[in-house]
Image (spheres, rainbow, N blue to C red):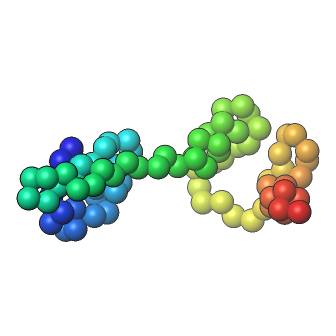
Amino acid sequence: MEISIRELKSKLSRYLAQAQAGEDIIVTSHKKIVAHIKGVPRVEDAAIQHLLDAGLMTWNGKKARGGKARTKISGKTMAEMVLEDRG
């Protein structure tokens, strides 16, 4: 998709969301290409989805609260595993 700088400035959030969803954004100035915006996919979403698909984690669709849920792998909470990884 090609858009002008003026259009990009007026609807920046919208175009950044489209780029993150996988659409390439070409930015033009006076009909000359000046930039190419390519979004970065959300890596954490893929990692979480992998854990859900593997049955290693469950989610009820609500906002996470507390750190009491334990994993099937180690019996530790997610918070404990993060702290352990950080050393």
Give whichever of 70, 13 is nearer the camera: 13
Please tell me which residue is depicted at 91% across the width and 47% down the height of the picture: 75
In this orientation, does residue 3 appear? no
User: What is the quadrant of residue 11 in the picture?
Assistant: bottom left
Which of the 4 image quarters holds residue 79? bottom right
23 sits to left or right of 63: left
Quadrant of the frame with the N terminus: top left
Q: Is residue 74 left or right of residue 36?
A: right
Residue extending farthest to the top is: 54
Identify which residue, 65 or 32, lies in the foreground.
32
> Position of 27 compared to 64: left or right?
left
Q: How many badges with numbers are in the image?
A: 0
Where is residue 85? Give x, y as percent.
84, 56
Which residue: 65% across, 43% down? 47
Which residue: 66% across, 36% down? Answer: 50
* Residue 29 visible at all: yes
Quadrant holding the C terminus: bottom right
**Residue nearest the observer in this picture, 6 or 11:** 6
- Tell me what residue is drawn at x 61 percent, y 49 percent: 44
Q: Quick one: 20 or 78, which is closer to the camera?
A: 20
Q: Position of residue 84 (x, y in %)?
A: 88, 59
- Where residue 72 appears, as percent x and y from the top left, is 85, 40
Using residue 85 as the reference point, say whether residue 23 is left or right of it: left
